[in-house]
Amino acid sequence: MRITRFIPALLAVGTAVTGCEPGSITEARNELRDGPARTLQLSVPVARDTFVVDSVLADFLDVTTVTLSDGLLAVEVTDGSFGLDVGAVTGAVSGPFGPFNFPVQDGVEFVGGDLNLGGFEDAARDATLNTAFAVVTVVNEADVPATLTDFVVGVVRIDPGTGNLDSVGGQPDWQTDGTGTPIQVMLADGAGNTFDVPRSAAALDTLFSAALVDRLVDMLLDGERVALVGSGDVTVGDGSNATIAATDQLLVTLKPVLGFDFTLPPAGVTVDSSVATQGLDLDDDNANDMAARTDSAVVTLDLVNSTPLGVEATVIVVADSLLDAFAAPAQDQIPIDVVSVSPGQVDAGGRVTQATSEVTGVNLSGAEAQAFMGPWFTAGIRLRLFPAAGGRSAIRSGDWVGLSASVAIYVRMGGTP
C-alpha cells in the first residue's frame, strides 16, 4: 500500500466576488455560511502514478525481475543442484584412463519457496508461458574430460508418501504434454546429442523449453512435490593421464527462468493495489455540513496503457486508511468506475511503439463525496490484464501503465444550505 500526502487546492468558481475566498480547508470550513452565495471548488488527488513494469511487479507482486538481452522481463527461480557420481563408479584413478562409459541419473527437488514469484503466482498459474528456459551449469570436479550423451532433463513428480520419484519399470515417470509425449529437453552442444565438460572446469548451456518450466511451475503452485531429473550416459577419460578421487562428481546446477511472455486466458489476470491518501481532515459534523452543501462532485480517471496487454481498471474508495480497500465491507466501498483501455500499438517484434489512453468522468453525490472529507481515504485499484489479439503478450522493462484519478468537489458557500 502506498501513502499519499497532499495540500488540497481551492478555487472559487461561478462568482465575481473577489478578495474573500478561503485560503485553506480550515478557513473554508469556518466560512461555509459567510459572505455572498458562491461556489468553491476543492480539488483532491485520489491516486496518481506511472507504473513502469519493473515497479509494478516490485510494488504489486513483490517479485524481483531481471531483464533479458532482448529487453524481455523475467523472473529467476532459485537454482537447484545434483551430482552425477564419477569417482564412485570409476574409483580413484591416477594415470592414463579411459574412455569409460556408464549410465548416470539424479535430480533435485524444487519447492514453492524457490519460485520467487510473489504476487505473480496467479498469472503464472493461469497463463501459458511462451518464453521460459533453464540455465545449466555442469562443473567437472575430476581432472578428466567427460562427455554426457543423450542426457535429458525432465519433470518428475515426487510421491509425497515415500519421497521417491514416480517411476515406471524402474525408470522415471516423466511428466508428459497433451499428446502424451514426455516433457524432456536434451543437454547438448549444438544440434548433436553430446555435451562436453573439460577436465576440472565448467560448461554452460541453456535448455530452451517453455513446456518444461511451465509444468514445473504449475505443479509447484498446485502444491505438488516435484523434481527436475537428468538421465543419460557419461563417458569419462580419453586415454590420457587423469586424476580422479572417489568423491568426484559432475555437479549439475539448474536455474529456471520465466520470461514475461505468456498467453493469458480469455478472462485475463488481476492485480490489486491500495493507495491511502490524506483527506480534507474534517470532523464528522463539518464533513456532514460540507456534504450537504455539495452541489456536485466529479472524479476524473485517466488510464494510459503502454503495454501489449489490454488493461481494465476498477477503482473504489473507502473512507479510511486501509492496507486493502477491497477487503473492506461491501457497504463501505464506494464504486467509482471501471475503465478499459486497449493494448498499446506494437511492432512486428511485439514491442510497444505507441501508448493508448482513456479518460472518463464520474459524478458523485454529496454523500459519496464525503468519503474524501475525513482524515484519510483509501483508493482501491484493481488492474485486470487481458490478452490482446492472438492472446500472446511479451512484457519488456520499458512497458508501463499510468493511472491518474482526482476529484473536484463543488461546495456552496454563503447564503443558506
Image (tube, rainbow, N blue to C red):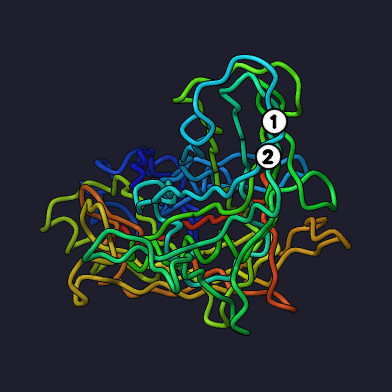
Which residue is rendered at x = 59% and y = 28% of the image? 139
- Cα separation between marks 1 and 2: 8 Å
Q: Quadrant of residue 347?
A: bottom right
Query: Of circles 1 and 2, which is in front?
Result: 1
Residue 363 place in picture, x, y as percent: 44, 75
Type of amino acid under label 2: Thr
Provide the residue designation for mark 1: 98
Question: How far across and how far down the image is residue 264, in percent?
Answer: 59, 73
**Image quarter of residue 200:** top right
**Residue 240, x across and y down, in percent:** 75, 20
According to the image, label 2 marks what residue? 235
* Mark 2 burial class by Cα count in 10 Å: few <14, some 14-19, many 20+: some
Q: Which mark is residue 72?
A: none
Residue drawn at the location 39% of the way across and 56% of the way down: 273
Q: Are the residues flagged by discs 1 and 2 in contact, CB closer than 8 Å? A: yes
Left or right: 22, with 15 as reference point: left
- Specify whether residue 121 is in view: yes
Amino acid residing under circle 1: Gly
Please say if 210 is above or below 179: above
Q: For the C terminus, give its image quadrant.
A: bottom left
